Image (spheres, rainbow, N blue to C red):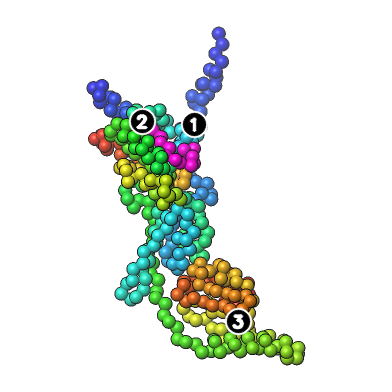
């Protein structure tokens, strides 16, 4: 009974972990804006977690620089399964204007399976909320809930 | 006993929430927001200016020949690589690229973030050689050169006759023809040409068109201050 209760409540309240992999800070500011009272994503149950081990959804911003690649992958590997990886902005999806640089390892999908891409440079807070809602649906599917 | 914030708490309890109720209520982007790209392939002339100016390298095209010898061109925009800077739309001479207010750009499967359009570019027919145009050009140039030497009275009719007589006919394939009597060799057309197909030398008074590079966009005629280019 308790297990069922916990499963239902965790499905409705996924915790976010935010990784900045060398981002210009534009996407990070937008992600923080989503958490402010104006957009207040906590209404939908999202909460920013301090540690990857407590998170359900990982949000990656930035073009995955060579220096940050190992750290990003080790942080992602610490997130317990089932997890959902969300790339935010154009950088982790393709490298954007840093494409082809010797110090950039984007796209992130070369290394891990990415579930949701949020396009934009930087995305609008509403678009981020759309993406996070999609991520919760995927998370539910992965957990075998309806 | 004093309850300092009771009034505030009760009014807030029954007032509307101060946050934007986004997923439940739709929200519109600001008027000049640059969101999802919409491509109008029917007006595109394949000058490739957008590809050249794109900082993120998000624009690509593929070209396949069909049975008529025409090019079937598919141009695609990768929104996952786009900075939404609108430079491509600003440089598009035909206004084929539009950045809309749509910001719902979520990619779950591959291809969700690709916007593409296909169009057919007709193969350019080689126009029949027109002896009239080249013949008239030197004639007009001679007239112009002669006028100062001839009596000034003859100047006015000659100048009027030059635009009327001109044998500058459009070539019929959309590529430009220069009217040497009007051209001042200002080089604006060469600078604005997206395909870098025009070479203009002000000193030597040379106006040359590289037909292979020309995409028949008409920009040179639009920008010409003297209307010396006929399309």
User: In the rendered structure, does residue A19 fall within the stretch colored magenta?
Assistant: yes
Classify 10 Å Cα crowding around label 1: few (below 14), some (14-19), many (20 and above).
some
Q: Residue A8: x, y in percent?
A: 29, 28
- Please name the residue that numbered disc 1 is placed on: A37
Q: Residue B152: x, y in percent?
A: 76, 88
- Please name the residue that numbered disc 2 is placed on: A52
Q: Residue at x 44, y 67 (%)?
A: B46
Q: CA distance from mark 3 to mark 1?
A: 67 Å
Chain of the residue under label 3: B
Q: Residue at x 53, y 49 (%)?
A: B31
Q: CA distance from mark 1 to mark 2?
A: 24 Å
- Please name the residue that numbered disc 3 is placed on: B180
Q: Of helix, strand and loop, which one carries label 1?
A: loop
Chain of the residue under label 2: A
Magenta part of the chain: A11-30
Q: Residue A67: x, y in percent?
A: 41, 40
Q: Residue at x 37, y 71 (%)?
A: B71
- Mark count: 3
Give the camera-side residue of B136 and B149.
B149
Chain of the residue under label 1: A
Tell if the residue under mark 2 belongs to the same chain as the one under mark 3.
no
């Amino acid at each position: 009974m308790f297990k069922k209760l916990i499963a239902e409540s965790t499905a409705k309240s996924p915790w976010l972990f935010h990784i900045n992999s060398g981002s210009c800070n534009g996407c990070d500011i937008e992600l923080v804006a989503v958490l402010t009272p104006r957009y207040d994503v906590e209404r939908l149950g999202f909460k920013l977690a301090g540690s990857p081990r407590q998170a359900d959804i990982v949000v990656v911003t930035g073009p995955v620089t060579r220096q940050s690649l190992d750290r990003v992958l080790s942080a992602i590997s610490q997130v317990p399964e089932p997890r959902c990886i969300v790339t935010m902005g154009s950088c982790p999806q393709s490298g954007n204007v840093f494409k082809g640089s010797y110090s950039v390892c984007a796209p992130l999908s070369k290394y891990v399976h990415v579930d949701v891409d949020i396009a934009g440079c930087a995305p609008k807070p509403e678009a981020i909320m759309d993406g996070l809602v999609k991520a919760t649906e995927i998370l539910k599917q992965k957990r075998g809930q309806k | 006993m004093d309850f300092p914030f009771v009034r505030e708490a009760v009014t807030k309890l029954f007032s509307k929430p101060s946050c934007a109720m986004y997923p439940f209520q739709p929200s519109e982007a600001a008027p000049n927001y640059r969101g999802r790209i919409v491509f109008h392939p029917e007006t595109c002339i394949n000058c490739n200016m957008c590809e050249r100016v794109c900082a993120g390298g998000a624009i690509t095209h593929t070209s396949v020949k069909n049975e008529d010898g025409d090019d079937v061109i598919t141009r695609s925009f990768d929104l996952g690589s786009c900075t939404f800077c609108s430079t491509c739309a600003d440089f598009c001479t035909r206004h084929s690229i539009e950045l809309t207010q749509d910001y719902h750009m979520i990619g779950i499967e591959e291809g969700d973030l690709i916007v593409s359009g296909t169009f057919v570019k007709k193969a350019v027919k080689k126009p029949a050689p027109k002896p009239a145009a080249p013949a008239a050009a030197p004639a007009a140039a001679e007239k112009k050169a002669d006028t100062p030497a001839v009596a000034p009275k003859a100047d006015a009719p000659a100048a009027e006759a030059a635009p009327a007589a001109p044998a500058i006919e459009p070539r019929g394939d959309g590529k430009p023809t220069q009217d040497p009597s009007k051209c001042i060799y200002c080089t604006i057309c060469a600078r604005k040409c997206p395909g870098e197909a025009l070479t203009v030398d002000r000193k030597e008074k040379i106006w040359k068109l590289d037909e292979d590079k020309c995409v028949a966009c008409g920009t040179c005629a639009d920008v010409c201050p003297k209307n010396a280019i006929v399309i």
